Image: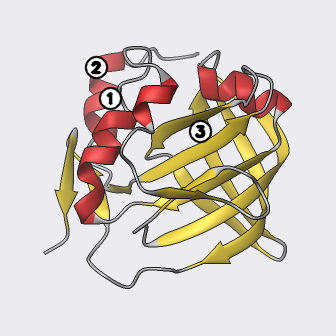
Amino acid sequence: MAQTVDPDAFRAAMTRLNAGVVLITAHDPEDGPRGEDVGMTATAFMSVSLEPPMVLVSVRTGSRMDELLERQPRWAASVLSESQRHIAGRFALRGRVSDRLLFEDISYYRGEHSGAPILGGALSILECETDQRVPAGDHTLVVARVLAARTPSAEGGPLAYFRGRYRFLR
């Protein structure tokens, strides 16, 4: 016999799980003459395997990122530092701001393996290629092979998400 869980109680319970904050990015070559960069803030991101190196990100089904990752297998993850809180907030504004404006005045470069925007100042960088897409309720779990991993910045601590707010480790 299936029990129904109250969505608000579930959401409240899950906010007690501390999570790292990651910017997922990809380049959409089909959007306009030069293409368009797309990004989203993610807290549902994790390592899946060391051999081969694999990660997983959960994206909302039907979102711009979900649709893009269905046809563009290469993307990047930038693990945000505490000084990049404004970037996390900006890319969490899905649907309210155009993707072109989201990348304005942010320091980034193109990933060698993915072509995706990679944030300057990120604690670590992973360039990925989708291996599997698994439907999971109102989200899609995107499992990817890691093509490159770098730790360009040793400065500062990680940005965390807990109880519905961005936090810093002290």
Residue 20 in the image: x percent, y percent?
Answer: 39, 58
What residue lies at 43% left-to-right and 72% top-to-bottom?
Answer: 123
User: Dividing the image into 4 quarters, which one contains the C terminus?
Assistant: bottom left
Cα–Cα span, label 2 and label 3:
20 Å
Image quarter for residue 71?
Answer: top right
Mark 2 vs mark 3: give the one in front. Answer: 3
For label 2, the residue is: 8
Q: How is the image coloured?
A: secondary structure
Q: Which mark is residue 11?
A: 1
Residue 122 in the image: x percent, y percent?
Answer: 43, 67
Q: Residues within 10 Å of mark 2 (few under 14, many from 20)?
A: few
Residue 168 in the image: x percent, y percent?
Answer: 18, 64
- Residue at far front of view: 33
Q: Amino acid at mark 3?
A: Ser
Q: Which mark is residue 58?
A: 3
Image quarter for residue 53?
Answer: bottom right
Q: Is residue 102 above or below residue 60?
A: below
Q: Amino acid at mark 1?
A: Arg
Q: Is residue 42 left or right of residue 146?
A: left
Q: Is residue 61 above or below residue 36?
A: above
